[in-house]
Image (tube, grey):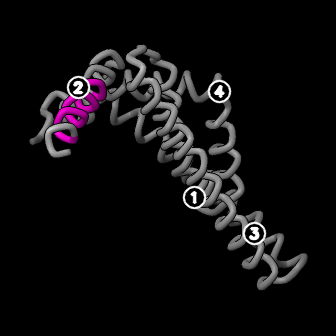
Amino acid sequence: MLNFRLLNRLLDSRSIRFYLGIAASLGFGVLVDVMVFIKLSLLVGPWITMAALAFLTAALVYVVYRVVDHRTKRLEQVVKTGTFEPDALSRHLSTLVAGLFLIVPGLFNTAVGLILLLKPVGTVLGNRIAWSVGIEWAEAYEHLRLEHVTAGRSSGAEG
């Protein structure tokens, strides 16, 4: 089912300016990365540069997998205990965004992704993203809690 409130928020002119600003900064980052990789390939050779880039990407995919898995387990633990912690929700969201930056190869993207994994930056960014798209953490938590309770009931009825 389409969430019209979320769609309206995403297509708002303020939101579009926000997304265009992000796209412009990413475009600048890509240009810087291309210049750095060209210089590096001139210094050490293109094959060593490509091998280093492939190794870095593979290592960062593994790091993203581990960090997202850890944050997901932490979020599940928060839901199971029944305590409302908005920081856990915002950190989970910022970790997913950081994962997008870390998986895409490049020095600029890697630096931005690693900065987003820092706790104060991640909390602020997660709250900012949630605010900009209209997510309220209390509603999201109640949805997760309800989903957890109904999943427990359905698995108990089957077993």
Are the two marked residues, 1 and 3, in contact with CB atoms closer than 8 angstroms? no
Per the image, label 3 sits on a secondary structure element best described as helix
Q: Which mark is in front, 1 or 3?
A: 1
Residue drawn at x 62%, y 36% as measured from the top left: 116
Cα–Cα gap, marks 1 and 3: 17 Å
Residue drawn at x 42%, y 14% as measured from the top left: 83
Residue drawn at x 58%, y 29% as measured from the top left: 122
Prevalent SS, magenta region: helix
User: Of the residues under marks 1 and 4, which one precedes in the sequence?
Assistant: 1
Residue 119 is tagged as: 4
Q: Which mark is in front, 1 or 2?
A: 2
- Residue identified by numbered label 3: 37
Residue 131 percent location from the top left of the image = 38, 21
Q: Is residue 29 visible?
A: yes
Q: Horizontally, is 15 left or right of 61 in the view?
A: left
Are the two marked residues, 4 and 2, in contact with CB atoms closer than 8 angstroms? no
Image mark count: 4
User: Of the residues under marks 4 and 3, which one precedes in the sequence?
Assistant: 3
Q: Find the magenta span and give its range.
A: 144-155
Cα–Cα gap, marks 4 and 2: 27 Å
Cα–Cα gap, marks 1 and 2: 32 Å
Q: Residues within 10 Å of mark 4 (few under 14, many from 20)?
A: some
Cα–Cα gap, marks 1 and 4: 20 Å
